[in-house]
Image (spheres, rainbow, N blue to C red):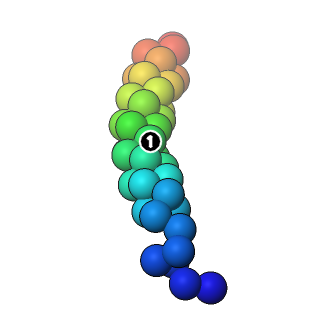
Amino acid sequence: MDNHNYPDADRIIKNFREAFKTTNGILSLVAFFLIVSIVNIP
């Protein structure tokens, strides 16, 4: 398989990487809030 025959693949991979970065940021925030909530529970 030659990736040069599929220009859309590069665009899809770039979009996936951007989405993954955004998802990582969201997951980090969610994990942070979960940890804070657990710590705040007496």
Q: Is residue 4 above or below residue 26?
A: below
Report helix, strand or loop for mark 1: helix
Instruction: State whether residue 40 appears in this view.
Output: yes
Q: Is residue 40 above or below residue 31?
A: above
Q: Is residue 42 above or below residue 16?
A: above
Q: Residue at x 46, y 64 (%)?
A: 7
Disc 1 crowd rating (10 Å Cα; few below 14, some 14-19, many 20+) is: few
Closest to the observer: 23 or 12?
A: 12
Amino acid type, residue under disc 1 in the picture: Ala
| Drawn side of residue 5 relative to residue 40, left or right | right
Q: Position of residue 15 (x, y in %)?
A: 43, 47
Instruction: State whether residue 28 appears in this view.
Output: no
Which residue of the protein is positioned furthest toward the front in this rendering? 5
Which residue of the protein is positioned furthest toward the right in this rendering? 1
Q: Position of residue 6 (x, y in %)?
A: 53, 68
Q: Residue at x 46, y 77 (%)?
A: 4
Tell how many labels.
Answer: 1
Q: Which residue has dot 1 on it? A: 19
Closest to the observer: 17 or 10?
A: 10
Q: Position of residue 8 (x, y in %)?
A: 50, 57
| Drawn side of residue 9 relative to residue 14, left or right | right
Closest to the observer: 37 or 33?
A: 33
Q: Residue at x 62, y 85 (%)?
A: 1
Q: Classify residue 24 by image quadrant.
A: top left
Q: Residue at x 51, y 62 (%)?
A: 9
Q: Position of residue 33 (x, y in %)?
A: 43, 23
